[in-house]
Amino acid sequence: MPDLNNLRILVTGGAGFIGSHVVEDLVRQGARVTVYDDFSSGYRENLKEVQADVRIVEGDILDFEALSNAIAGHQIVSHQAAQLEIIKCIDHPVHDLTINTAGTVNVLQACIEQGVEAVINASSACVYGQAQSVPEAESHPLKPNWPYGASKLSAELYADYYQREHGIPVYSLRYSIVFGSREWYGRVLTVFLKRLLEKKHLVVFGDGGQQRDFVHVSDVARLNTLLVRRFNNCGEPLNVSSGTGTSVRELAEKVAGLSQGTIDIVHESIQPGESSALVEGRVRLPSELQTMILSPNRATQLLGWKPQVGLLDGIVEELDWLADHISRWTRFKV
């Protein structure tokens, strides 16, 4: 496979969890990468493997002038920056809207003004809301159940507008549950992993029958790179997912199994929106999704992409990383 031949790419949020893996993969494939990040949640440490090979610009996607200046001279923009916390989006929906929608509009407008050739827009499975059919294809009804999903869907609609009005391909990638090293602390797998290291029993809300679709961050980064190689003149939304459902109960069993029988699973009966009495600071999400299983078929057909990292292998990899970075997981981002 030929390298990216010094293709000039700017990655917003490039010091974050997913963004830093995207940056690493692009650099390995020969791209010239600029990271644009305000470091509100990203870490320079995330870029240590490629820091000599990237340009880092500290800036906010809400600062249009700084953003536009940073984008100038780049051929492609990979927009990974976002507000991700579900509780925050519920408590502060205008803040969520501002970053995820207005911030994306800033990126798109700057790309037009600077002559960028194509844009990758990180979206979310949350645009679908509660599953009406499984697996959820890109044609599934779009009825977000959280403000976060609404802000991501609004960003997709703006992306579609810019594509139709200005002819710039914009691909919105609907990520399922991305996991792996450098993940932030807050989602269910991270809570299980931290409690495993602390030798505490794993707490499952309700019967744990909620289904989730986990995809490893290295597979997500690889898809981003494949897309850079194969842009066409018409962007389209793409699910980035395994296509396989894992219940929260099954996930707990996989994690507990790594303890060689020393860690048990405890079920806690609390309602959505209530705080856990067993895990300090943990809240069961309101309007909780019962099923999130996305079909990756379109990405497979368009790019020949299939996930390569299995769930258990990915969990072990993330646990190994966590053991060396436990100080990063001190505050919930939910």
Image: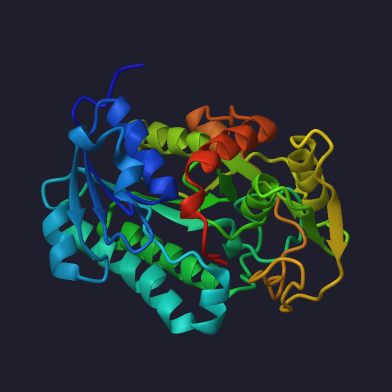
Image quarter where the C terminus lies is bottom right
Q: Nearer the viewer, residue 259 or 121?
A: 259
Say if residue 251 shows up in the picture: yes
User: Residue 133: x, y in percent?
Assistant: 76, 55
Q: Residue at x 78, y 42 (%)?
A: 256
Model colouring: rainbow
Image quarter where the N terminus lies is top left
Q: Is 73 on the left or on the right of 307, as rendered? A: left
Q: Residue at x 48, y 66 (%)?
A: 152
Q: Nearer the viewer, residue 233 or 247?
A: 247
Q: Is 92 on the left or on the right of 187, as rendered? A: left
Q: Is 282 on the left or on the right of 183, as rendered? A: right
Please say if 321 is above or below 104: above
User: Residue 9: x, y in percent?
Assistant: 23, 42
Say if residue 294 shows up in the picture: no
Of all residues shown, which one is farthest toward the top? 1
User: Residue 238: x, y in percent?
Assistant: 52, 47
Residue 127 figure quarter: bottom right
Please say if 277 is above or below 187: below
Q: Is 25 on the left or on the right of 283, as rendered? A: left
Q: How many marks?
A: 0
Please say if 290 is above or below 211: below
Q: Residue at x 64, y 29 (%)?
A: 313
Q: Nearer the viewer, residue 240 or 310?
A: 310
User: Residue 119: x, y in percent?
Assistant: 32, 50
Q: Nearer the viewer, residue 196 or 6?
A: 196
Q: Residue at x 52, y 60 (%)?
A: 330
